[in-house]
Amino acid sequence: MHLLRHDWTTEEITEIYNRPFLDLVYQAATVHRENKDYAEVQISSLISIKTGGCAEDCAYCPQAARYHTDLEVQALMKVDQVVDAAMKAKAGGASRLCMGAAWREVRDNRDFDRVIDMVKAVNELDMEVCCTLGMLSEHQAQRLADAGLYAYNHNLDTSEEDYKRIISTRTYDDRLNTIKNVRKAKLTVCSGGIVGLGETVADRVSMLCTLANMPKHPESVPINALVPVKGTPLENQPRIPIWDMVRMIATARIVMPGSVVRLSAGRNEMSTLEQAFCFMAGANSIFAGDKLLTTPNPAFVDDMAMFELLGLKTREAFKNGRPENTLKKEEAVL
């Protein structure tokens, strides 16, 4: 059985990443198959509950207010709108709903109160509820946990060394501190990065090393392929080769064998064959639905056809059990 480690060196992870491609995929697939549920893939749905107007300067993001993109700014959604979207996602096979708001940080105001109500409402649907709202304090993380939040997403994006090239309005330590606050609230962590920003292999390895050496591995590790958007600083970045995506997924699977590795942004540009390589290399979650926040994404019906072709099955919600904060009152009494 592949043992969990938290003492990886960059040299070790570099050696894994640079192995001959077929050898790397074989090892990752072997690690993945040590889990009897290797053919299960979780379907998650990601909706933008508040779009655009963000004060950050993330070079890849069309939601930054300072960039001139075609994105239409939209105010925070109503609770019933979110519940309706969640019910449709669940009917399509999704077991997790992630709600994203284009905020730099969470503020203690009526908008956050409404997000708390959204979390409570979606939790009642027996779906894993995830939020990505920017930076948050320990107290705010606890409020989300008390409302029934299952996971909090806060990606590292890239390496600490490369970070300032991509974002200048917050620090790498800001990212790590938010993750620490999430852990203090006993929420599960969703944290990964983006491939295709113009980073080096050393940057990719460094990011994976940071994640793999956390005291507890993120339960969820999204691997995103950059989707260049006109009007952003990275609009002219070339599409990342699929082989690089597979290498990242395979390496993440080997160094974090117990995590759910999410094949995230960029799937719309991937063929079924390319996605099959990603699943073989250890990806066991996708985001489904017509949009991934603000970028195109394959439709549910297309993903279900792919699942049937590849012999994959959907993963149910709370596969690894419910954290105490998501238990219903009657369950907590038993």
Image (spheres, rainbow, N blue to C red):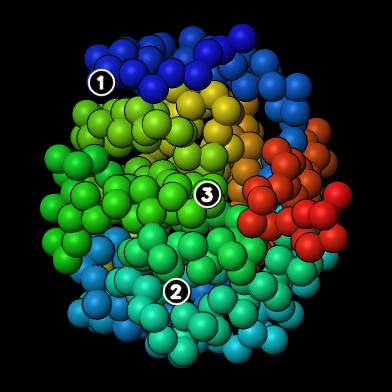
Relative to 35, 251 lies left or right: left
Q: Residue at x 47, y 39 (%)?
A: 218
Above-or-below relation of 103 to 178: below
Q: Residue at x 22, y 45 (%)?
A: 198
Question: Dot 3 corresponds to which residue?
Answer: 186
Above-or-below relation of 129 to 11: below
Relative depth, front residue between 199 and 258: 258
- The label on residue 277 is none
- The label on residue 10 is 1
What is the C-alpha distance between the residues marked 2 and 3? 22 Å
Relative depth, front residue between 185 and 313: 185
Quarter of the image that includes the N terminus: top right
Q: Position of residue 252 (x, y in %)?
A: 45, 29
Q: Amino acid at mark 1?
A: Thr
Question: Dot 2 corresponds to which residue?
Answer: 101
Relative depth, front residue between 208 and 62: 208
Residue 17 in which image quadrant = top left
Front tag of 2 and 3: 3
Front tag of 1 and 3: 3
Mark 2 is surrounded, within 10 Å at the Cα level, by few (under 14), some (14 to 19) or many (20 or more) other residues, namely: many
Mark 1 is surrounded, within 10 Å at the Cα level, by few (under 14), some (14 to 19) or many (20 or more) other residues, namely: some
Q: Position of residue 172 (x, y in %)?
A: 21, 50
What is the C-alpha distance between the residues marked 1 and 2? 33 Å
Q: Residue at x 39, y 81 (%)?
A: 108
Instruction: Assess whether mark 3 and mark 2 are in contact (beta carbons under 8 angstroms).
Output: no
Q: Position of residue 331 (x, y in %)?
A: 82, 55
Instruction: Assess whether mark 2 and mark 1 are in contact (beta carbons under 8 angstroms).
Output: no
N-term-proximal mark, 1 vs 2: 1
